[in-house]
Image (cartoon, helix red, strand yellow):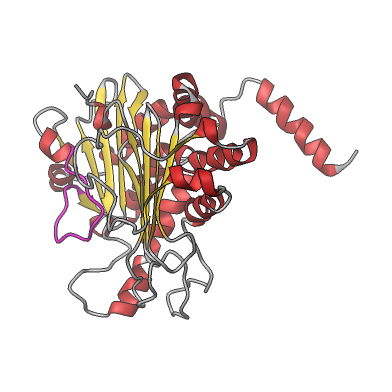
Amino acid sequence: MHRRVRWLLLFVVIGLTPVVGMTFYREAAPGVEMSEAAAEFVDLLDAEQRKTALLSYEDDTDQRVNWHFIPKDHRKGLQIKHMTKEQRAAAHALLKSALSQVGYSKAEQIMEIEALLAEFEGKGRFIRDPERYYFTIFGANFGGRWGLSVEGHHLSLNFVVEDNKVISVTPQFFGANPALVKNENKSGFEVGTRILAKEEQLGFDLVNSLDDAQQKQAVIAEKAPEEIRAAGETQPPKDAPVGIPAGKLTSEQQKVLRELIDEYATAVPAKISAQRLAAMEEAGFDGVHFAWAGATEPGIGHYYRIQGETFLIEFVNTQPDVAGNPANHIHCVWRDMHGDFAIPIE
């Protein structure tokens, strides 16, 4: 029997067999693993660290919804830099429990590429440091409702868990500078590295597949906006969807749109991403809108928006990268149209 077939059969057998190993356990109950990982992280903190890393879920709501991805002099939470080796391992285990393997890889690379920014900028006005990322736990009530924020430059991940079930995973923000590494460097990043490759390339693939009539619907502006909308705001914008609905795309174009949505949805564990996609389907995939602004080729500012009844995706690439290459600096976000941070929109 061919090796690949044997592995596929083995995978099917394993998938049908009750498994208690951690790899499969996370797929079954990500909220349980998050709660356990958070408790282990907290147990390793000393009294002073707990004052920094632990905030009240209810009393510190202003802090809990205070999110942003820009470089800042100060953020809530405990910096990785100020953790011991054991605490850092526990923090990363917590982050892994909250994300899929793909999502964690992106987050890790976004942190690491700060070293390249530090190399190219030198002593600029911002501190560029792969360890300048902050972990905050709201509530520490791991059997009830609690929240998690992992944030720093170009990364803002926010979660709410209740009764060991993940009930909110937004805002989910990833950024990349450079979007495509074009310059030789000493920081270990190969020329050609693209942390958020599919988020950008699939957008180009879709817009460039549209015929003239479809583009008239999809393209909402000749120039891309400078930034995603409602950056740092508690809730997403409630504007009606614009652009072309999925129902007016060909089957091949719909396939590309689904693949693009999947790239955002699957940043979190499989069970949660499946819930995201099921909610989209229940609301009606044909009503999901795709909108584009700006250039349809790399190196010139471009933007897209994907909006359904339950979610909003925005992507923008207009700023130069750290080496000055134009339109090589990505910001992209997934938001919940029913309410971020487990706070319903009224």
Please state the horizontal and vertical placement of residue 20, each as a whole percent of the image. Answer: 56, 25
Residue at 53% x, 30% y: name it: 247
User: In this rendering, is residue 256 above or below 108?
Assistant: above
Residue at 14% x, 57% y: name it: 74
User: In this rendering, is residue 228 above or below 277?
Assistant: below
Nearer to the camera, 119 or 252: 252
Residue 276, picture quadrant: top left
User: In this rendering, is residue 53 above or below 183?
Assistant: above
Please state the horizontal and vertical placement of residue 154, each as a whole percent of the image. Answer: 31, 56
Residue interval drawn in magenta: 65-77
Residue 305, picture quadrant: top left
Nearer to the camera, 64 or 55: 64
Q: Is residue 167 visible?
A: yes
Nearer to the camera, 311 or 2: 311
Image quarter where the C terminus lies is: top left
Q: Is residue 22 visible?
A: no
Residue 330, picture quadrant: bottom left
Magenta part mainly helix, strand or loop? Answer: loop
Please state the horizontal and vertical placement of residue 155, each as a whole percent of the image. Answer: 32, 52
Q: Point out the residue furthest to the left here.
A: 59
Residue at 44% x, 79% y: name it: 185
Image quarter where the N terminus lies is: top right
Figure disc tally: 0
Please state the horizontal and vertical placement of residue 57, each as a whole percent of the image. Answer: 16, 30
In the image, residue 337 lies in the stretch drawn in magenta: no
Residue at 44% x, 21% y: name it: 283
